[in-house]
Amino acid sequence: MPVVQFLLRAALPARRAAPPNLSSCAKVALPPLRFPRSDRLYASQPNLPIQNIRNLGIIAHIDAGKTTSTERMLFYAGHTSKIGDVDKGSTVTDYLPQERERGITIQSACIPLAWKDHLINLIDTPGHVDFTMEVERSIRVLDGAVVILDAVSGVEAQTETVWKQANRYQVPRIAFVNKMDREGANFVRSVRSMEKRLGGWGISLPVQWPVVMDESHSASGIGSGGPAFEGVIDLVSMERLDWSRDPTGRIVRREKLETGPGQKERLFDEATAARQKMVETLAELDDELMDLFLEADGDMSKISTGALHAALRRLTLAGKVVPVYCGASFRNIGVQTVMDGAIHYLPSPVDRPAPEGIIRKTGESVPVHHSDPSLCALAFKIIHDPKRGTMVFVRVYSGTLAARSVLKNVTRNEKERGSKLLQIYADDFEEIPECSAGNVCAILGLKVTKTGDTLCQSNDHRGLELHPIPVPPPVFVRSIEASSVSEEKALTEALEILQREDPSLHVSVDEGTGQTLISGMGELHLEILAERLKERKVSCEMGQVRINYRETIQDEHTETYLYDREVFGKKSKAQVSLRITPRQNPDDNVEHPGLLPIGDDDGNLVLAGVDASRVSGHGTEAGFPGLDDISAALYGGIQGALSRGPLLGFPITNARVEVTHVQLYTPELSTLPAIRAAAQKATQLAIKTLAPKLLEPIMNVKICVPAKLVGAVAKDVSGVRRGEIITLDGMDAQGDTDDFAYRIIEAKIPLNEMVGYSTALRGLTAGNGTFSMTLQGYGLMAADRARDVVEEVRGF
């Protein structure tokens, strides 16, 4: 069986019949390949070398063209017979009703593609800042990524965020400058914006050059695009690629680039100069190519295409360069070359460093090699299917995952039994017998596994755990309650499912009011949650969005409390003395002394460990709790008090609490609950005496706007939003004069002022402005503002 036919095995559901799968450099259409529907492209394919696997993610700012590009990849690989449209809600990877209604990606979707003897496990990720957790857990299991940029806007606010996420996991990447057919598109300016704003990983190196008509070029300058954008020049092979023969872009013609009068001469000169710069950059970074460069003695034509491909691959895998492509996905130009670039330059699982695992008993760090026969897999995503139940998406790093296996969840020290293995096709699934190392699949039947858990075979006693996936803290809060008592159970079950699916969603109960609170990453995040609850037929009511404030102390106080009560005829008695002080953290921001850093447990330091010198009345007779148990009870009581401040019930942050003395009486009186209650009451009294102050979340906001609108947006930030502008930067040296250049305003703004900002920014910029924000810390609230917040929350 031919290799391509063997790999495709692309029989799909009736709505996804396989069209011809054509080479990216085909000159004529090939006859369609037909396969039985029962054959699929299995992740367990035993004859597929692991070197031919690419776990690839599409990452970018919102509306850069991720899903549009993904649809073309699906079409050209033969997975679909028709190109889906985001505006019409007909895309494969955006299958949620909320995604199709809004035209944005909300959750990541995985789908395997066959392309040139390779298997690409493709993950399309969201671009909206509210769903950054989806990007985080996808990048965690990727081997390579394609970063997509808008050719007009260049690097936008969220582009920097996803770039830093890829840096954190050391993921090699290529870039695709999309929308070159838009008025004002400029390839050179986009690459410069990458050089200026995307640091920490490689040199942005163009490997293609845009083809535009002379008239458009003279108007917009070198590297420009626009409606006259026709195709690209491959700088490695010095060929012109033309997609005009087929409106679907399936047929690509390659012609050797030659000089000549008019446009040909201009294109040849520009491409030659760009290629020379590319070769010189590669030679500076790669010793093997430097030898060839010196042997060529300045004649670039002597350096073969193969040598350049090899050098680009070595340097891309090493993180020294980022090959940059260009095209226009909506017009079906340039997508196949990006897929070729993923095959040529991005790593297979073999090319990536082995992930580190930790043996829980010893703390020893152990590399997990793909050749290790012992199973080791990471659960990176969970979804709940109404028919199939909970599906856990896993990346297999070593060994083979078989269906109906008994597994051990190392993270939670629980045994799990998987019922079936599924190959993932976005919202479509196919049962498979096993999943080999380097691949991605879904498991049915797991009860306790959550995002970031490590799975191994049940008889594996090493206790090897992979590093978990970090979850960002929530910043927006809404109350939620069932419409009736009969709906409470349905609401609780639905929230449990959604919380397991989305780790960035937090559900808690306010002890004072009894309200159920849901916390998320932003307004849209919580809005989508409300819609998904309605979709599950859960009748509930949600309160207004409010901010997750904090409370803190600014002085120190010593408190002693004697707990002496009788409950249900049983008397309890214990006394705790403690000292509470503001925590002086060396990481406090010196330039902004009112800003408190974020830390684990809200930055608090609880010193509850006690020895015999700090405990009076502790006898050796039977019945007295041990010192370790006493310390744990003290810690629990103090943490309970810190979790709810006396001002508005928000958690206390940046407090240092030290237990100085514990007075016990008899074993019957001084029980652990009595000690815990004494510690909690002593902490509460101390905090109340100190009259805590309110803190408000301070956001690090990056706003990307057209250069001509910078003044209006900056005025709104510093005036209406109570923000502090930190930097105001142009994309390149031409940013002040180019009407199509974008500038980035970086500012620190209280989160309260960011509620509804997306709508306000659209009004200020006629829909051309975008922003992203991350939690930077908590700042002390002004007295007048604090009074307003107290009145707003209390209602009086």
Image: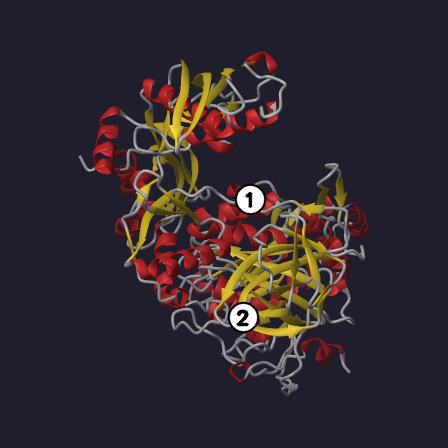
Question: Observer-nearest residue: 197 or 219?
Answer: 197
Q: Amino acid at mark 1?
A: Pro
Q: Which numbered disc, 1 or 2, marks the residue that appears first in the sequence? A: 2
Question: Observer-nearest residue: 729 or 37?
Answer: 37
Residue lying at 56% horizontally and 57% vertically, measured from the top left: 381
Give the answer, above or below, for where 35 lies relative to 184.
Answer: below
Within the image, what quadrant is residue 18 found in? bottom right
Q: How many marks?
A: 2
Q: Image check: 324 left or right of 186?
A: right
> Which residue position holds label 1?
470
Q: Amino acid at mark 2?
A: Arg
Using the rendered image of the protein, determine whether residue 604 is visible from the camera's viewpoint. no
Which of discs 1 and 2 lies nearer the camera? The answer is 2
Q: Using the image, tell me which numbered label, if any, was put on residue 581.
A: none
Residue lying at 39% horizontally and 27% vertically, measured from the top left: 566
Secondary structure of the residue carrying tag 2 is: loop
Q: Where's residue 587, x and y in %?
A: 51, 24
Q: Where's residue 659, x and y in %?
A: 50, 18
Q: Where's residue 447, x and y in %?
A: 58, 59
Give the answer, above or below, for where 103 lies relative to 5.
Answer: above
Label 2 CA crowd tier, 10 Å (few <14, some 14–19, many 20+): few
Looking at the rendering, in which quadrant would you find the N terminus?
A: bottom right
Q: Using the image, tell me which numbered label, if any, was put on residue 388.
A: 2
Give the answer, above or below, for where 577 lies relative to 29.
Answer: above
Between the C-alphas of marks 1 and 2, the distance is 28 Å
Within the image, what quadrant is residue 557 found in? top left
Secondary structure of the residue carrying tag 1 is: loop
Question: Observer-nearest residue: 98 or 220?
Answer: 98
